[in-house]
Image (spheres, coloured by chain):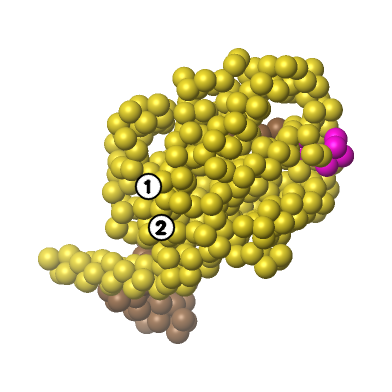
Chain colours: A brown, B yellow
Amino acid sequence: MEETDHPAVPGSRDVAAVLRTDPLAALLGARLAHPVVLGCVLFALVVAAIVLGPSSESRFIYTDF
Amino acid sequence: MTVLRPLAFALAVLVSLLAIADVVFAATFPSAPRLSENFSSAFVRLELARLRAQPPETIVLGDSVLWGYDVSARESVPALLERRGIRAANFAYQGGSPVNTYATLRAILASGVRPASVVFNVNQKTFNAADSAYSVVHPSMWELARPLFSSGDARLVTTPDDAQTLDARLDRTIARYWQLYAMRADLREALFGDVDAGHALDALLEGVTGAGARRRAAHRPKPSDFEGTYDLTPLDDSNVSAHFLKRTIALLAAERIPAIAILTPTNHTLLHAYVDGPEYAANLAYVRRSLARGGIVVIDADRAFGPDDFFDNDHLTAAASARLATRVARELARR
């Protein structure tokens, strides 16, 4: 049967085809749904936020010239 | 319900990973040659725990002059002492003052670290009530030293206005249980060599474009920059810095720790209009007398350096720092 776009979403036929045929997209879709992977992703995000976050600790004001 | 269970599991994985990372982080975080601008109390605790295992011969306390302002950590006086065979720990920090020296010494001794000797500097500018560090202790050091201060001494310390806000309390509570969070400033400093990635990127761009070098070359301290930096009112016990200097002297005597005090090198050529008078000399003599009475060896470096040895009013060039280190090393060897 020939695929057609969803009436409300132009181009949806192409996206659906990619998701079905691209093994990487399928793999990511399945793995991200797994709680262990989600926990690891959250961990990476938390650590990245701490490492890359802006300094907000400059509370000690001193004068040097 | 079907959504909540995997989500709870993912959160459990997150917490477990953070707990494992915290243990690994605390065990492997490297020692720093000197305290960063925003050092955390967690980092000081970690450093002190390491020093307990291998006590240093000398602990250096004081302000940016000994910390090594505008010179690399390798060119700071404590690092140069190390190169001369003296195991020295640099606990001086930018914005130091007598109350900061006292707080740091209290925190170090309370941690069980007992150095064979202490070297510290006394900077005349910190006796000025207008000085930013006159009665303010670095918040991370204050966190460690506050319980060790008598109520009378604590009343003399100016605490930050935001210390009791909900934000600050929450921050302290999280930091108590989460080492990575508590040491985030130290981690960023270790990774980027700056307070955060943004500042490090700025510095990198300035280095590439030469803007930083041009700005430094254009920065020539003028005498008028230092108007009001030195207060020549005669010193007495009502001065907070004089009070905590005497507390430090008494503590060193009570603990029987030999100490050397450096009267901070001062650029008299630059500051001539503000410091070259009998009042300054009298205040310097007051400090020298107080130290000598407590049995502390004094290295009077106030006029020991020429104008070319300074970046500004009191910060020494790398070559001058090396000369000061030689003098301190010689004095330590005599003891």
As for residue B310 lying within the magenta part, the answer is yes
* Mark 2 Cα-neighbour bin, 10 Å: few <14, some 14–19, many ≥20: some
- Which residue is the site of mark 1? B144
For residue B271, say whether it is visible. yes
Q: In this view, does A26 lie above or below B126?
A: below
Can the viewer see residue B133 in this picture?
no
Task: Report whether mark 2 lies on the same chain as mark 1.
Answer: yes
Q: Identify the residue at horizontal 12%, vertical 66% (top origin).
A: B1
Q: Which residue carries the number 2 mark? A: B45
Q: Give the range drawn in magenta.
A: B306-312
- Determine if the magenta segment contains residue B279: no
Q: Which chain carries label 1?
A: B
Residue at image position (53%, 52%) is: B258
Kindly check if marks 2 and 1 are in contact, taking CB atoms under 8 A apart as contact: yes
Give the amino acid at mark 2: Arg
Quadrant including the C terminus of chain B: bottom right
Q: Earlier in the sequence, mark 2 or mark 1?
A: 2
